[in-house]
Amino acid sequence: MKVLIPLADGCEEMEAVILTDILRRAAWDVVTAGLSGVAVTASRGVVLMPDQQWDDVNPADFDMILLPGGMDGTYALCDHDGVQDTLRDFDAAGKRIGAICAAALALFKAGILVNRRFTCYPGVEKEMGDGFHRLEEPVVVDGNLITSQGPGTAFEFALAIIEIGESKEAADSVRKGLLL
């Protein structure tokens, strides 16, 4: 499975790192792509070094795109034409899309949350307006869309992605190695 994780200044570092780490433990090909600059300064000041810059990747080469949250990082995902186009293209093609925490706003901005079940960090859904109601579940799957609530659910989110993208056995193997 080939996964693209865009990283923007202000992203939630736990979510970005846990997703990348857990999926790589499953031997997936994970590429983090910075939206600007060589390094990304995450929401708590942790500096992350993306594998590549967004402009150097071809999103069509990937099977899945996963968005970490963090409010400032989320707003950058909302404003980035390449990310927004990729979300719409992936959804139209039925490719897997994942978002955790505030990053559900980027899905909303791309127009792919209409009539979909989802979850996000509590309160973020208020920025979406009427008709968008988050579910209380830690991880929600609706077709090709996988969403989760926040930093505390990042492990379960990543393991659910492995189970959906590969198998329950692969997810259980990674879970066992993590002592979860």
Image (cartoon, rainbow, N blue to C red):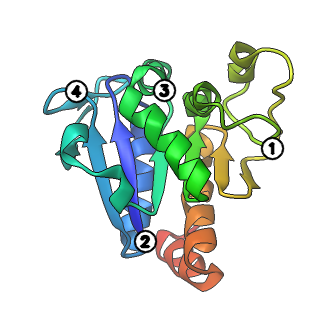
Q: Position of residue 147 (x, y in %)?
A: 65, 46
Residue located 31% across and 24% down the image: 9
Q: CA distance from mark 1 to mark 4?
A: 31 Å
Residue pointed to by mark 1: 117
Residue 109 visible in the displayed image: yes
* Amino acid found under the numbered disc labelled 4: Ser
Quadrant (top left, top right, bottom left, bottom right) of the N terminus: bottom left
Residue type beneath disc 3: Gly
Residue at point 22% right, 27% down? 36
Q: Is 171 situated left or right of 72 in this image?
A: right
Amino acid beneath label 2: Met
On residue 36, the disc is 4
Q: How far separated are the C-alphas under marks 2 and 1? A: 24 Å
Residue in the image at 64% along x and 80% along y: 168
The answer to whether the residues at label 2 and label 3 have Cβ atoms under 8 Å apart is no
Residue sitting at x 83%, y 38%? 115
Instruction: Tell me which label, 2 or 3, sits earlier in the chain.
Output: 2
Cα separation, mark 4 vs mark 3, equals 16 Å
Question: Is the residue marked by circle 3 packed among few (<14), some (14-19), or many (20+) residues within 10 Å?
Answer: many
- Residue 49 showing in the rendered view: no
Instruction: Examine the rendered structure and indicate whether residue 164 appears above or below residue 88.
Output: below
Q: Say which mark, if any, is on residue 70.
A: 3
Q: Could you say where residue 111 lies in the image, as x and y percent from the top left? A: 65, 31
Circle 2 is placed at which residue position?
Answer: 1
Q: How far apart in space, not on screen, are marks 1 and 3 (Cα)?
A: 21 Å
